[in-house]
Image (spheres, rainbow, N blue to C red):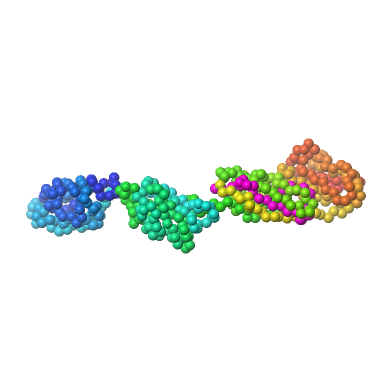
Amino acid sequence: FDDADAIYSVGDTITVGFSVPTNEPAAATKGQIDAIFSFSQSLGADYTGSWAGNELVITIVDIAASAPPTIGGLTLTYQGGNGVQNAGLTSLESAGTSAAITGDWGTFAGPTITSVTADDSDDGDGIYGNDDTITFVFSENTNQPFGPNPTQANLDTLFGAMNLGTAYSGNWTNAQTLVITISDATGGTAPTLGATTFTLQAAGNLKNVAGTSLATTDTSPAITGDWGSPAPQITGAVLNSDNRYLDITFSRAVFDTALGIGAVKVSDFTLNFNRNGGNAGSVSITSLTKTDGSALAGGETVIRVHLSIDGTPIGVETIEIRPATNEIYSATAAVAADTETTGEITLNSQMVEVKEGEVVIRRNIINPGRGEYVALNFRLDKSAKVKITVYDLAGNPVKELYKRKAPAGLNEVRWYGKNKRGRKVVQGVYYIVVKIGRSRHVKKVL
C-alpha cells in the first residue's frame, strides 16, 4: 500500500504471509519471484522482493503493461519446483493457491462536498418546482464521473435515488461544480432547506481529477439557498373606520434598499385620490409606522400608512396606494412592482348629524407627531360670533383656533395638535372650549 494515492502504483507492496517460518529461497528479483509464484493478474513490468520473518514483501517497481490487479481478485499459485519449504527443510515443497488478496492500494481520500445550494434563476415563485437547480461544489477538481452531462440515472447512481421528480439532469459547469436542473418536479420530494443532505455512493466513482483517490462517499452539509425569491406583493389593505390610517400587508418582509436594510418611507409609496363628487378635497400620506404605532425598522410585512384628509369624506371618495417605482425591496433584492395595488378603497363617511347650536367633535384621539388632527363641527341657524380655544390640563391656553363671526349652516374647525407658536404639542389631555354667542361647550381631546 501507499497512501499518497488510492490506486495501484509504483511503490505499492504485496505482502505474502506463510503459516510457518520458511527456508527463504531467493526472491529478490522479478524472475526469482516468478519462479516461486504465478499470479492470476499481472503485477506489471518489474517488482522486487524481500523476506521479513514469515512474510515475503513484494514491492512494485514498474507497472507498465499491467491492468491494475484488483483487491479481492488477485491470487498467487505456487509454481512447480518453487523451492519453498519450512525453515528446517523437513517439509515437502509448498503447493496450492492463496486466498484472494485483501487490503488496499492506498486510502487517499477523494473530494468532499463543501456546499449544496438551491436556486430558482427567475425567482418566479418560492416553492420547489420545474427549472429549480441544486448546485454541488466540491473541495477540489473531480474526475467528473459520467461525463459533462450526467443523466438522471447517472445522478441516482452517484447519490443514490435522489427522488427529485420525474425528470432531472446534471451539468458539470467546471471540474469542481455540478448543477442539477429539475425539468419535471412531479412526484418528487422537495429537499428541505437547512436540513436535507446528500451522500455520494461508491458506485458513482467520484474521485479527484487525476482519478488517484478513493471513490468518495462523503455526505454534504445541509442544503441552503431558496426555491425562488419573488418580489413583495400587496396581499391586503384595511382602512381604519375614521380614515386615519390604512394597514397594508405585503407577501414578504419589505425594505427601503436592495441590500435588504432600511425601513420603507413615505416616498416609497404613491397615493391616487378620486373625489367622486364628495366633500374631501385631497388625501396625503403623513407617516408610516408599525401597527402598534412604533417606528419601522425594516423587514415588516404590515405597514400602517397614516393619512391626512382635507375636508370631510361622505363615503364616495376613493384612494389607491401603490409602491413607487423601484423603491420597495425584499431581503433578496426583489423589487415590488409599481403595478401592485391596494385596489380602490372607499373612504368611510365622516358626516355626522349636527343640530342647530350643537358642537360635535370627531377624531378626539390624536398623535400630533403623525400629523393627525381634531375636527369640530357646529351648526348655526344664523350667523353668530364664535370663539374656539384649546387649553391644557392645567387650564393654560394652548392655541386660539377660531375667533370670528361664523356663517349660518354647518361649520368645521380643525386642530392639528400645534400650539400658538406652531410647535407640536406633547401627547396628553387637552380641552377645547367653544363659545357660540352666550353658550359654552367643552370637548376633551386625548
Q: What stretch is highlighted in magenta?
A: 307-332
Of residue 63 and residue 426, the one placed in the foreground of this image is 63
Furthest residue to the top? 421
Please name the predominant secondary structure of the magenta segment in the image. Answer: loop
Residue at 13%, 53% in the rendered image: 36
Furthest residue to the bottom? 187
Q: Residue 322 at x, y = what percent?
A: 66, 50
69 displayed left or right of 222: left
Residue at 25%, 47% in the rendered image: 9
Q: Residue 238 at x, y = what percent?
A: 68, 54
Residue at 9%, 55% in the rendered image: 81
Location of residue 351 (image quadrant): bottom right
Of residue 182 and residue 383, the one placed in the foreground of this image is 182
54 displayed left or right of 234: left
Residue at 15%, 59% in the rendered image: 96
Q: Residue 202 at x, y = what percent?
A: 34, 55
Furthest residue to the left? 90
Visible residue check, residue 121:
yes
Q: Is 328 a magenta residue? A: yes
Visible residue check, residue 394:
no
Of residue 434 and residue 29, the one placed in the foreground of this image is 29
Q: Is 346 a magenta residue? A: no
Q: Residue 273 at x, y = what percent?
A: 72, 50
